[in-house]
Every structure is written in C-alpha cells, then in structure tokens.
Image: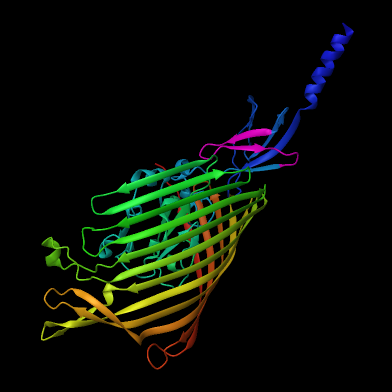
Amino acid sequence: MKKTITFAILFILGINSYAQSFNGKIVDNSNNPLPGATIVASDNPNNGVMSDAEGFFTITLQDSNVVTVSFLGYTTKKVILISSTNVIRLTEDNVALDEVLVTSASREIQKRSEVPGSISTISTKTIEETKAFGIDQLVNQVPGVFMSTSRAASNEQHFMAVRSPISTKALFLYLEDGLQIRPTSVFNHNALLEMNDISYGRVEVLKGPASSIYGSESIGGSFNFITKQPTEKLTGSIGFQTNDIGLSRYELEISDTTSDALGFYIGSHYVHRENGPIEHSNYEKLAFTFKTVYDFSATAKWTTVLDITDYRSDMSGSLSESDYFGGNFESDQTFTERDALAFRLRSTLDKFWNDKNKTSFNFVFRDNKMDQNPSYRIRQFRNIGQLTGFGSGEVNSNQFRSFVGLIQHKLDFNFANSSFIVGATSDFSPQKYVAESTNVIVNPETGRNIDFSINSGDYILNYEADIFNYAGFLQYEISPLELLKITAALRYDGFEYDYDNQAEGIAGVEDAVDTFNNLTPKIGVNLQFFW
C-alpha cells in the first residue's frame, strides 16, 4: 500500500515537473498592444488565457509549448513559446479590418476615425466581388474619385480626378505599401498602368493633402495599394475572364507560409484585347509580383516585394463628336502606340526595439522605360483647308533608374494616446529622354494617318538629368480627450535637378543645375461627434 501511495505521489510530481509558465505580449504589426487576445494551448483547448489591457499574458503549459493565438479582425497564428518573454505579432485580416484600420496617413496602422482627413477604403471583399478588368473599375467606386480611361479606349491609360477637374497634372501620388511608384518630378501621369492589380489586398484613397509624411505630389490626394500577405497554409488559384468587347484576362496566385518564419506570395495576370469597340485599340499587359515576409526574430520582420510589368497598347486617339453620335468608331490612327517596361524592387526591415519603439528601414530600386509614338503629337498639314496627304509627329523614349532610401521611426508614449513619427528619405533618379520628329503620311480622303518615318537626328528634345530628392519629416499626434485627435507635422523638402542637354544648338535649353527647397507645416484636428 505504501508503495502504491509513493508511486502515485511521484507520478503527480512527474507530471507537474513538465509544467512551465510562459510570459508574452500580443501586438499588431505597428507594435500596438492587442488587449483581449486569446491564447490557447494547442494540445488542450480547455487551457487558455486572455491578454490584459497592455497585451500581456501568462500561461502555464505542460506537455507542449505550442499555443494558438487569435484576436477578432486578425489572422489566427500558432506560436512556439520560448522561456524568455514572447512578443507575438498578429497580422490584420484585410476582410475584417478594411473599414477600421488604415495606413495611408502615416505608413503606420491606425484607426481611420483618428485620421484628420478623408480616407476611403476599397476592401478585399469589394476587390474580389468586383472582378475588375482594370484598376479604374476599382477606384471609380470611391466617392469623389474619377479615373477616366476613355481617351485610350480603356487600356489603363488615364486621366485622374479627386474632388477636382480631370487633369494630367502631377497632383496625385501613387503608392505601393506606402512607397512611391515613381520618383517626384518624373511625370506620374499613367503610372497606374505599371501596377499589378491582382496583388492588392486593399486600396486606400486619401483625398487631399492630409499627410506630411509624403511629398508634394500628394497635394491632390494619394492612392495606396496594399499588397496581399502570405497565407498561413498553401493556397492557389487560377482565373479567366472575358467579355464581348474583345478583352481576355488570365490570373494566377500562389501563397504559403513555408515555416513559422517565412511566407511568400506570387500573383500574376495577363490581359489581352483584340477588336475592341474602337478601332486601333488593342493592348496587352503582363504583370508579376513576388513577395516574401520573413520574421527572423520576435522583434524583426523583413519584407521584400518584386514587381515587373510589361505593357503595350495602341493609341487610338480621339473620336469627333459627329463620329461618336453617329456610331462611327473607326480610328484616324494606324500606328500610334505606347510601350512600357517597369521593374521595382522594395525591401523593408521593420525592427521593434520594444513595445513602444519601431523603426522601418526601406530600400527601393526602380528601372522604368516608356516608348511612345503618341497620337496626341500628330498634326496633319492642310492647304486652304484641304488635307495635303502629309503631317508631322514624334517618337519619344523616357527611361529612369531610381535608388531610394527611407527610414522612419515611431515612438508611442504612455500618456494621452500620443505618438511621434520622425523620418528621412532620399531618392536619386538619373533620367534620359529622347524625342525625334516624324514625317506622317495621311490619306487625304479619309483623314487616316497610314504611315510614318523617323527624322533621325532631328531632335525635339534629347537630354539627361540627374534628379535628387531628399526630405525630412516629423509628426506628433495626441488625444487629450477620448474623442479628440490633434496632429502636428513639419516637412522639409530639398530638390536638385541637374540638366544636361545632349542636343545643344539643336533643341532644348542650356545645361543647368536647379535647386529648390521648401518647409511645410501642418496641423489637423479630428473631433468625433455623437448624437
């Protein structure tokens, strides 16, 4: 009997010897604590705890140190706990949080209700249900936004308006995950044709100059396209769309988290159109995105995104009023086109020093080239009002490479829900532009432009320019009252444009180096009213 009792005591002690307490903290991708998150032992669903108001938790485990962490609006995650303090970072579920959280104002996740500006979100669900053939079919669902593609028969070449007249001016900033698609001063009109719309989990449109984090081109508004996160398990999809106006689209997506630390996403689409409603409006586009997210420690995350876009489109030009109302959609153009090849590589290291401090280190490389034989440059010659059979035009090529560095630090304070963001960025983009005149052959009976030849060496412009943008910015936010948010910001911009004319005496202006600088303050107040 004594042996039995002794054995039972030793058995119980043996079980308890495997029990161990683990401490940790649940935070989001911006290091904000998540109170009320559930932490459950993977081998015992009855053993669970919740994080406190600061996101901290303590749980006692026995046979396994694997837990499942979940929080409403975030992706559930399995974690192997370690003996030291565990910082568990949950990624927002785009479907659940699209209407709650935004990143456009500060590159950091924050509640939309706390941003002193007008932000509209195109949710994951909306993107999936729209099944858009192009980005215009998405952004035109945002009130106050109109992306017009009628000029080029909806081939993703566009005008843009955000609570403003339609314009090709550089008033709008196009971003991917908070980083610019093109450098400042390189014409960003038509930049959206370089995007891979299948890769975006959601889109945020900031209307007006509501943020000092970005530069001058965001004065009319900004479009932030947020790429999809790797899925927890292996997923994949293929898609095909077609319509009755000659357009076909093929899609492919693959995503997985190959280990507890590394996940990837691949998304690609190919779109092609022939025999559209307007003559000479064929186009094709191949876009590819490869994204990796590597959590190589509890306090560091490395994200890399590669984008490649190959685009070619006819340029049909405009229809006259009489042709439009008469149902005559023939084109006066037979050879005009636009051809673009865009390459972008972005690498971001997010370092969480503690639960109050986060630094983001960003590097971006761009390599873009766009060749055009543009319809809007063709001029037909007339003699006493009659077409002569001749005209003029141009061919041009614009290419640039960019080397971009950006660092941003966010510090959260313990009082009044306040935070401070400080950062600096530099963008060096050597650019080359060549435009030569062309001779155009015109059918004098129909007015169609039927052929052309290049006047080689007859330069309209031929230059190289080194473009250097640099900026520093800071932003402070505080909520002295629960329903009141005050934002104060300051931004300094410097710009240097080193122009080297390659056709001196023939075209263009003399070589010059121009420098500009600007200091921009900002203050915003956001007060929520309840009736």
How many numbered discs, if any?
0
Residue 513 in picture, x, y percent from top left: 50, 85
Is residue 299 left or right of 338 when viewed as pictured? right
Inspect the magenta stretch and tell me whether residue 79 lies in it.
Answer: yes
Is residue 507 positioned above or below 527 on the image?
A: below
Residue located at (32% from left, 62% from top): 161
In this view of the protein, which residue sits in the foreground, 272 or 14?
A: 272
Quadrant hosting residue 156: bottom left
Quadrant hosting residue 391: bottom left
Q: Which residues are magenta?
A: 66-85
Q: Residue furthest bottom?
A: 505
Residue 244 in picture, x, y percent from top left: 23, 50
Inspect the magenta stretch and tell me whether residue 455 lies in it.
Answer: no
Residue 246 in picture, x, y percent from top left: 25, 54
In this view of the protein, which residue sits in the foreground, 49 or 385?
A: 385
In this view of the protein, which residue sits in the foreground, 166 or 467?
A: 467
Is residue 224 positioned above or below 464 on the image?
A: above
Q: Residue furthest top?
A: 1
Residue located at (46% from left, 71% from top): 184
Residue located at (37% from left, 59% from top): 285
